[in-house]
């Protein structure tokens, strides 16, 4: 399979304007993500999709490939599709790689590439929940799946409910998983997704992937041991650097 990694990178950010260009130990965040993605053996090519010429110019300066897209995309999925079209090359799959995870492990990308076999429509990753605090953190998206490791539902709430067990013990009585946010799209499916209208469940939970499930698409789930360390604020940067021992 021929797989392209696309890294959406917007300049505008309510909580951290210019986030892709922030310096992290001598390199910009977007350069760090790009270099990590380039190390992934499962990818045929890596590009950065951006709506800002400042980011595009910076990417060119460090030797990366930038594709300009329009500003008003409702999601990273839509930006990925426009970037794919503008890039002008054909691929079997697109991997949407988060542009705010500068310490992503290339093996995490390879894990997702491994299920891009042609029959897989969509895929994403999950990691086990091992504490009550994480399970009941509404900022963490939990996953319900079937026996084929395909998503049935994503929610900020805890599903399933464990009857007769204290909530602090739920994670010991059921194998809960939380979402780790990279996506793989088969390119024909990606085109179809951009034509879908927002759905009721998506609007309720503010989770784009529920639109896909409501419209009958199958999302393959890949368990990973690599946790994501997203940087949305200056405080996140301090926390992540501390966690990484930097």
Image (spheres, grey):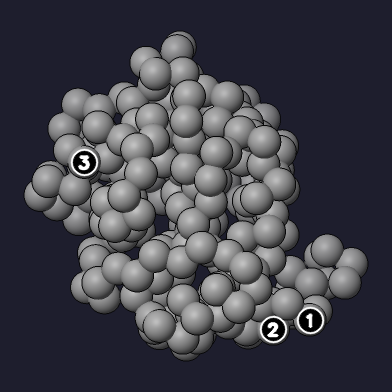
Compared with 34, 46 (above or below) is: above
Q: Position of residue 194 (x, y in %)?
A: 19, 48
> What's the CA distance linking mark 1 and mark 2?
6 Å
The residue labelled by disc 1 is 26
Q: Is residue 163 left or right of residue 100?
A: left
The mark that comes first in sequence, 1 or 3, is: 1
The residue labelled by disc 3 is 191
Compared with 202, 234 (above or below) is: below
Q: Is residue 207 visible?
A: no
In the picture, the disc for residue 23 is 2
In the picture, the disc for residue 3 is none
Do residues under tags 1 and 2 come within 8 Å of each other at their CB atoms? yes
> What's the CA distance linking mark 3 and mark 2?
34 Å
Q: Residues within 10 Å of mark 1 (few under 14, many from 20)?
A: few
Compared with 12, 232 (above or below) is: above
> What's the CA distance linking mark 1 and mark 3?
38 Å
- Label 3 sits on a secondary structure element that is helix
Q: Is residue 64 left or right of residue 163?
A: right
Residue nearest the observer in this picture, 1 or 229: 1
Quadrant hosting residue 80: bottom left
Q: Position of residue 14 (x, y in %)?
A: 40, 85
Q: Is residue 186 left or right of residue 115?
A: left
Q: Position of residue 112 (x, y in %)?
A: 56, 33
Residue nearest the observer in this picture, 232 or 42: 42
- Label 2 sits on a secondary structure element that is strand
- Which quadrant would the C terminus be assigned to in this image? bottom right
Do residues under tags 3 and 2 come within 8 Å of each other at their CB atoms? no
Quadrant hosting residue 131: top right
- Label 1 sits on a secondary structure element that is loop
The mark that comes first in sequence, 3 or 2, is: 2
């Amino acid at each position: 399979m021929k797989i392209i990694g696309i890294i959406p990178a917007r300049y505008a950010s309510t909580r951290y304007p210019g986030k892709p260009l922030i310096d992290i130990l001598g390199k910009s965040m977007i350069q760090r993500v790009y270099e990590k993605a380039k190390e992934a053996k499962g990818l045929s090519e890596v590009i950065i999709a951006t709506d800002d010429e400042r980011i595009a110019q910076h990417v060119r300066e460090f030797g990366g490939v930038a594709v300009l897209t329009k500003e008003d995309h409702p999601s990273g999925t839509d930006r990925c599709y426009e970037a794919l079209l503008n890039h002008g090359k054909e691929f079997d799959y697109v991997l949407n790689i988060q542009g705010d995870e500068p310490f992503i492990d290339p093996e995490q990308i390879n894990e997702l590439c491994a299920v891009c076999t042609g029959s897989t429509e969509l895929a994403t990753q999950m990691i086990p929940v091992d504490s009550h605090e994480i399970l009941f953190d509404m900022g963490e998206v939990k996953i319900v799946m079937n026996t084929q490791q395909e998503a049935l539902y994503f929610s900020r709430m805890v599903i399933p409910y464990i009857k007769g067990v204290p909530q602090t013990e739920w994670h010991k009585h059921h194998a809960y998983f939380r979402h780790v946010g990279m996506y793989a799209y088969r390119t024909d499916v990606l085109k179809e997704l951009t034509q879908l209208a927002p759905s009721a469940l998506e609007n309720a939970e503010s989770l784009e992937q529920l639109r896909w499930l409501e419209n009958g698409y199958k999302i393959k789930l890949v368990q990973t041991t690599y946790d994501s360390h997203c940087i949305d604020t200056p405080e996140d940067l301090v926390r992540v650097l501390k966690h990484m021992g930097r």
